[in-house]
Image (cartoon, rainbow, N blue to C red):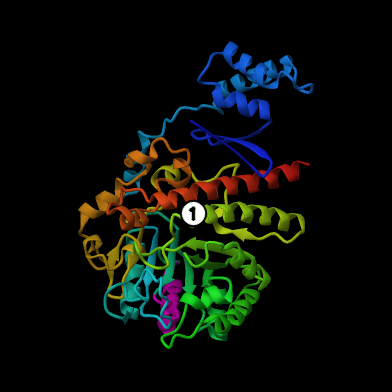
Amino acid sequence: MIHQYQLGGYNVVLDICSGSVHVVDEVAYDIIAIFEEFDRETVLAKMAEKYGDRDDITKEDIEECYTQVVELKEAGKLFAPDTFEPMAGELKQKTSGVVKALCLHVAHTCNLNCEYCFASQGKYHGDRAVMSLEVGKRALDFLIENSGTRHNLEVDFFGGEPLMNFDMLKELVAYARSIEKKYNKNFRFTLTTNGLLIDDDVIDFANRECVNVVLSLDGRKEIHDRYRVDYAGNGSWERIVPKFQKLVEARGGKDYYMRGTFTHANPDFLKDIQQMLDLGFTELSMEPVVCAPGDPSELTAEDLPIVLEQYEKLAELMIECDKAGKPFTFYHYMIDLTGGPCIYKRISGCGSGTEYMAVTPWGDLYPCHQFVGEEKFKLGDIWNGVSNTAIQDEFCSCNVYARPECRDCWARLYCSGGCAANAYHSTGSVRGVYKYGCELFKKRMECAIMVQIHRMMGEDE
């Protein structure tokens, strides 16, 4: 299967199953488009008809181009067959029972009252609570006990607002460091915060102990303050931006992300990215809102063409900034054209419910943070392990080939079938397809590949 598109002045051909990316001239682009539909003579005749009036393209050029396409096919770099389907279930079964990451909900409470919050202002449709040190320790013990031979273990501090339980976080990390050598493990912590409680102590802790920090900022002040308000209705932009700037400067090059959310209020989100750049931030992410159907913040069909155009303009901006010597990173445009994710990830996805789980303040286990509070998705708890094996089996069998709609999609080995939570909340099934999200993902991938092509072509020059 191939996918062809034109963007940024490039004719791009993706061979889906080999992973090959080709940048070709217009003749090759047109030949590839009809190569499998017609025989050689017909293809050459159609090309001669289209390019016969061109002085710069001869009959010999067209024939040579056709031969090169044949050679690429014979080399397995064009029209490669899909041989991965038999592996889909098998690969996931091999790692069944091995947990490599936990999302610790250390605070089911928040000091902001964001209208679009999928977590019901941090309560997850339940009671407000913070995680005790006892539960936190047991969660880390559970992770070690179920991690098999894995050395690196990922732990995300999440909420609500995790810094509302900061003293416990410090004690929990100290506990982790005290036991990791004993079990030949290395804990890698990530902190997600809205920024209100950042101070020098938090900055020191985050930069010493966290491999990454995720900082919530929606870009322009008027956009950010529209939704991200406190319980008195006051915006938070002016209070958090200086703290974010101080934290990022102190990180000294360590990983961080400014994570924004775009909604129906700002489908023109490139303006928000530009605001982040103007503030000095260079590691950026803007995510489409996750909300209930009919919510005022929900992205609409009318927003879709605007958003798709924004992704293209974002790619153009990244190239301009590269040329100016001021590069920046956009999370969804990070792609390695020389390697990329292994075939396990390409087929199986994020590992929610199997390799990755969320832990509530009470120690309950859920497939991921977006399922917390959905009682039927409760997997078990950190003391007794997974007891709801039917739900875990459903997630274990959830792969790109389990979704009929994905079988003929060119992006299937890039998205791995998409997000199970988004699928469930839009269709009622973790094996469903969130079609709006699919359109956004496919455009992001086209843009991401084009940006990387430009960077690689620039290096060659």
In the picture shown, does residue 323 fall above or below 446? below
Q: Tag 1's secondary structure?
A: helix
3 or 160, nearer to the observer: 3
Q: Is residue 79 visible?
A: yes
Quarter of the C terminus within the rendering: top right
Left/right placement of residue 453 relative to residue 236 reads: right
User: Where are the magenta residues, as a range?
Assistant: 160-180
Residue, x 59% and y 19% (percent of image)?
70
Q: Which residue is mark 1?
A: 304
Question: Residue 69 colored magenta?
Answer: no
Residue, x 38% and y 42% (percent of image)?
400
The percent coordinates of residue 345 (x first, y second) are 44, 46
The percent coordinates of residue 141 (x first, y second) are 34, 68
Residue, x 67% and y 29% (percent of image)?
26
In the picture shown, does residue 278 fall above or below 448? below
Total numbered badges shown on the rendered structure: 1
